[in-house]
Image (cartoon, helix red, strand yellow):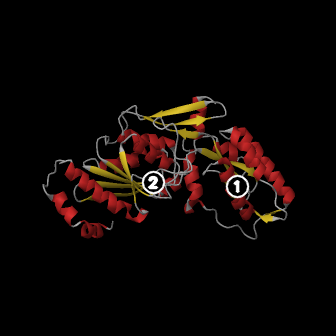
Amino acid sequence: MSTPQMKRQTQGLALAAALMLSPLSMAAPGVGSPLVLPPAEQAALGQQIGLRLNRDYHDLTRVPAALAALKPQAGALPGPVLAEAWTRLLQDQLNDAHARLVYSPEALPLDADAAEEGPSGPPPEVMRHLNCGVERVEHYPGNIGYLRVDAMAPPEACAPTMAAALQVLAQSDALILDLRRNRGGSPDMVQWLASHLLPPQTALSSMVRARDASSEALKTQAGLPGPDLSRVPLYLLTSSKTFSAGEHLAYDLQQAGRATVVGEPSGGGANPGAFRTVHPHFRLWVSLARSVSPVTGGNWEGHGVQPDERVKAPEARRVAYGRALKDLVQAKAPSAMPGEREEILGELDEVSKLLGL
């Protein structure tokens, strides 16, 4: 696959995964009982899954074991039950947290695959509903900025919103970036955000396909709208729900020595891809590539991004705030209000409660 082709297939694909794994994406129950598949139809579905994996999956060496595990059951199974069981098998055999078979109570359009070949992402009304992933922008005493981003939305539609959020925080002496509920999104937004947090031309995790030895290298870019925050101390919050492109940003910033990660190990999904229709009522997530770090030569698949300071997710913002204040005090960072940070640290529990941390 050429680099332009890979870019067309991988850009924004993890956002489809984010929507698939989010309550916002859950299809409404159909009228009547779910489709029930007898063994013969299960076998036919398994054959279609095999055709799709052999055609598109990024690493063919993993496919045979996965297909061998997808054996029809002795009796008929409802679609949702079969999808859940085969999802577990695919994830185990492919060693791929993204792998997923999804049942649709409504018949899927025949042209669904063609629609998914181009850059993916939620429709404009969903992006507006999600505010392009920007959930909260706040300023804390001690001049600490806080930004919560719940999705990596495509920058071609959402860069202005994200740039506006960053501009609000441009005067901060330290920044807390909250990815605890970020289920993934567009690799292009990972690159866009990283370009504001790292020097230009910094190598990011690339997209690699083992089946044809093709790859797409990602680097930070210069000249994008928004402030340069590459020298602002950065604290990144993660949880077990942080997934896919959310992990991509956290992992690359951590491995570059740019961010201190606070919270829980993330979900462990490092393979961008896309949904493919394999039956009128089933869609299969197919990973088209794997992420490879220029620093470690590996990625976060299966084990997640490991925090530098491990705390329970609900405590991560308070802990990161205290750590940011302490680091600024120890670094003797200039302040327009001398002694303010020391005073806050002395009353940190009370201040944190007042701020709702």
Residue 25 left/right relative to 102: left
Work out how far the residue at label 2 is from the one at label 1, CA to CA, in angstroms: 31 Å
Residue 89 visible, this orientation: yes
How many C-alpha atoms fall within 10 Å of the one at disc 1: few (<14), some, or many (≥20)?
Answer: many
Q: Estimate the x, y position of residue 338 in percent, counting from the top left.
A: 12, 54
Give the residue displayed 73% in from the left and 48% down from the top. 66
Q: Residue furthest top?
A: 2
Upstream in the sequence, badge 2 or badge 1? 1
Is residue 357 rendered to the left or right of residue 217?
Answer: left
Secondary structure under tag 1 reads helix
Residue under numbered circle 1: 89
At x 17% / y 62%, what residue is drawn?
343
- The amino acid type, in three-letter code, at marker 2 is Gly
Q: Which residue is mark 2?
A: 133
Question: Who is closer to the viewer here, 36 or 129?
Answer: 36
Residue 228: image x %, image y %?
A: 31, 40
Residue at the left extreme, as displayed: 338
For badge 1, the amino acid type reads Leu
Front in this rendered view, residue 172 or 89: 89
**Splitting the image into 4 quarters, where does residue 194 fall?**
top left
Q: Is residue 138 visible?
A: no
The mark lying in front, picked from 2 and 1, is 1
Rendered location of residue 68, percent (x, y): 78, 49
Element under disc 2: helix
